[in-house]
Structures are given as C-alpha cells and as structure tokens.
Image (spheres, coloured by chain):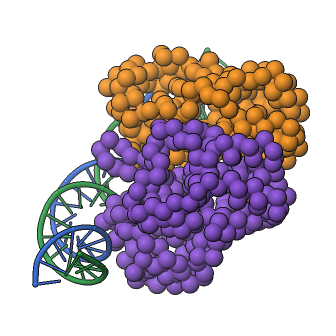
Chain colours: A orange, B purple, C blue, D green
Amino acid sequence: VIEAHLAKLRARGEVTPGEEQAIRSAVSEMHQHPADAVIARAFVEQDHSTILLEGLMCRYKDLKNGRRQITQLHVPGDFADLHSFTLKYLDHDVMTLTPCRVAIVPHENLRQITEALPRLTRMYWFQTNIDAAIHREWELSLGRRTAKARLAMLFSELQVRLEIVGLADERGYALPLTQVDLSECTGLTNVHVNRTMRELREEGVVDLQGGRVIVHDRATLWRIAEFDPRYLYLDKRDL
Amino acid sequence: VIEAHLAKLRARGEVTPGEEQAIRSAVSEMHQHPADAVIARAFVEQDHSTILLEGLMCRYKDLKNGRRQITQLHVPGDFADLHSFTLKYLDHDVMTLTPCRVAIVPHENLRQITEALPRLTRMYWFQTNIDAAIHREWELSLGRRTAKARLAMLFSELQVRLEIVGLADERGYALPLTQVDLSECTGLTNVHVNRTMRELREEGVVDLQGGRVIVHDRATLWRIAEFDPRYLYLDKRDL
DNA sequence: CGCCCAATTGAAGACGCTCAAGGCTTGTGG
DNA sequence: CCACAAGCCTTGAGCGTCTTCAATTGGGCG
C-alpha cells in the first residue's frame, strides 16, 4: 500500500531491500480521513509524520482577516509532514482536501533510521529539500507570475508529480479541487481563477471539468508557465 | 570565524565539542566575494556548500521577461546552500548582495558527517527545514499580505534572525539593501516599495536610511506583519 | 566637478479584487 | 417524484492596489 511512496523515492535512486524493509516496519498504523479534516495543527507538538497513500492534502497558513495561502499540495506517495520530525511542531496546518488514506510513522522510528541508515536518512532529507524547492517555485509564481501563468504552473507541476506515482498521463489527471482551492494555491480570488480558467479553456490549453484536469496542449501549457521540471529533481543519482 | 554559524546551531540546541570539531574540520577553505557575485548558478552541479560568515546573500529565480523573485535572504551564520548536498544542483541562483566572507564545506565532508554523526546530521537537516519554513512564510506574504505587511514581515524576520548572531538589537540593524532588492524580496516594484516605505516611516514604525533599519515601534511592526517568530523555531530542543 | 546609481515623485493605466446576482448540480426530505 | 437547500461555478459592474513610464532629486566617489 505504500507503493506510491516507494515509487517516489525510486524516482531519485535505488531503494535497497533493507531500506524498503526499514520503511515498511517504520509504519505503525494506517488511517482514513474524511475531506477537509485537519491532520496537524500549527504549533502543536507532533510525535509522528504522515505518508499520504490516497487522496489530496495541503499545507496552508492563514492571516487574521481570513485570507488563506496554501503553501503546498500533497499527492499520494508524499511524506506530508516529514519535516515535523526535526521541527517538532509545524508552522502551518495540514488538511485533507479529499478523503485520504494515510500511513503513520512515529518520529521515534524515524530517529532510529537516522541512527542506523545514513543513506535512507539522506533520501528523506532530500525529500524535504524537494518540498523546499516546490515552495521556492511557488514563491516565484506568487511574486512574479501572471494569473494565467500561476495556474499553468500549478497544473504542470501536478501533472509531473502525479505521473511519478502513476496517477497522471500526458492527457491529464484527476484533480477534485474547487476553484476556491485553486485560488488559495495561487494567491488569487476564486472569481479571478474562474475567469482565468475560462481563458485557458478557450485557448485550448487546459480544462478542469468534473474533477479532472484535461491537458489539451502540454507544450503551450509549459510555455505559459515557463515550467522547467528540473526543480522537481527527477533524475537518478547516487545518494 | 564560524562563530556565527555555531551560534545559530546553538539557538536550537547544544553543540558538543566533538560536533564542533567535526564542523570546523569540515571546512576546506575560506573565501571572499565582492557584491553582486553569483556564488552558485541554477542547474549547475555543486560539490560543496557555503557557510556565510559576513555579508548578505540571496537565493533568487528569474522569469524570461526579467522579473526576479528573491526567495530567501541569508545572514551571517547561515548555510546558504546546504540543500545542494542532497540536491546535487540548485533550482535557483545564489548571489551576494554585499561583499561576503564565506567558508567552503565540500559535500564529501558532509557525507562523512551523515555517516558518522547522526545527531549533527539531524541538526543540519533541521536547518534546511527552517529554510523551508521561511519559504512558506514568504509564500504567505507574496500570496496574501498587503504591500505594507510584506515589508513589515521582512524587517521583522531579519531583525530576529540577525539578533541570533548578535548583529541586531531591538533598535535596529545594518541592512545595506536597495529598494530594488526589497522589491525583489516582496514581489512588488521598486516604486511601490518606495511609497510603502514612506508610509511606514511617516507612521513612525520603521525606517531604512544609510543602509540601516531603524525599528521605532516593534510592537506595531509585528502587528502590521502579523509576525509570529515561532516559524523560525528558536526554542531549545533535544535533537 | 561631474558621473552614476539610488531614491523620490507624478500621472496614467492595468490587473486583479470586491460586491452582487444568477445558474447549475447534487443530495435530501417530504 | 418533486421541492428545496447547499455548494460551486459563472458573469457583470465598479473599484483599488499596484504597475508602468517618465522625470527629477540626492548622495557618494573618482
């Protein structure tokens, strides 16, 4: 059931049988969450991390006036809050966007991995560094990209990330998000997301209907977004 | 000379004599850079990381139309590109903003630390996770904060980060940045930064003159920014 | 003294926001 | 089986924050 997680690790490099065994036995339990459930609240002490197996989750931060910024989306295979292992508490909430199945990994087990398996430790360190790389690409979107490019970026990124775990192909992928969700990812309003989506649809680039992203013209989508997948670090390496 | 770096690590927890020795001997050389020098170019293979000893550096990403987003500022004590150890290349450029003194740490030495010193490895993993936390706070700024709040946020964050290494007090700190630099941090134009700085000055909150940030009213500054320093993880912990 | 870079200010315009209303789909209960 | 509610999508109109373009001022330095 954690195949997606292993697939994500293997996108970077080999996972030895011993490492795979260590990962499997680090999982203490499986769990199911409904949509819109807060998995981890900001500034609350954590004693475990969560691997997303099925569904979509997000990290977000709020301002007092209610304006919300989603700082990252999580797809199956992601360690949604691995960074809480070193941080002890999170600086953001983690919430499900759809019903989700997850695997729980106690921090104590992660600690033992860092004591005994340096290579696997580096792999997990690497994974949190990818999260940071995604944050940086989103900073570029939020700070400098136009509305259309922000949405194009988001759809491009998700397509690549979902392809790694076999949940997308070149034609599209399931994405059961509302326009409000998209607006909170892109720093726009839902109204403006709606208008921008219409433009992208009328230009024959992408469409989102029935909870599914349909990529009509990937080349144009990437060009609009100035999307360069290298920031996702998908090439294989020695670790 | 790496005292600032040790001070930053010690803000989170103890550094044992053995760990301190490992850090010191991991440094292969010192180096001096002029202002506006690119230290690491995006997508170019790296074989070392860089500790900033003196001066200011930044990470930035550009769009094709020339619009630039600075994704993080680095102050003395920071490991500016520690993440290149696991990533092998960076997804952004790293540049000096002022003349800088740096210490070079070959990745091979970091690798040996991960093989032999799990606790120090966790400390460094933690440091890259702080970078990610800063990225998230900036995402919130870029996506949802007003211009005034973005600048207030930036000045608040830098004051706290510089205090850790003894380069700021409650009255202010040296910050030899131009308004163009500030605009690239905050996703604004230099013109709008200028106008917003004037507002903050006229309200008696902060001022930036002669390369120095003068904090006249820290409480108001934090309130405008909705600044909560917990995202910088300055409390001491077992590691 | 004059050059260069940064800061500053003005005026006009654009991109995205706010407020508001209407339509569509889905699920629920009478 | 239909009425109704709830949530999401869609569209219109007006507005505001921030941008763009341009010109002027100020300060540091060779």
Which of the 4 quarters of the picture holds residue A106? top right
Residue drawn at the location 41% of the way across and 69% of the way down:
B177
Residue drawn at the location 81% of the way across and 20% of the way down:
A17
Q: Inspect this view and state whether residue B131 appears.
A: no
Residue drawn at the location 76% of the way across and 33% of the way down:
A120
Q: From the viewer's side, name the closer residue of A213 and A65.
A: A213
Residue B43 coordinates in the image, percent (x, y): 47, 38
Residue A200 coordinates in the image, percent (x, y): 36, 29
Along the horizontal axis of the image, is B156 left or right of B192?
right
Q: From the viewer's side, name the closer residue of A25 and A196.
A: A25
Residue A74 coordinates in the image, percent (x, y): 64, 35
Q: Quadrant of the C terminus of chain A?
A: top right
Along the horizontal axis of the image, is D19 left or right of B148?
left
Q: Is residue A62 above or below residue B176?
A: above
Residue drawn at the location 70% of the way across and 23% of the way down:
A14
Q: Quadrant of the N terminus of chain A?
A: top right
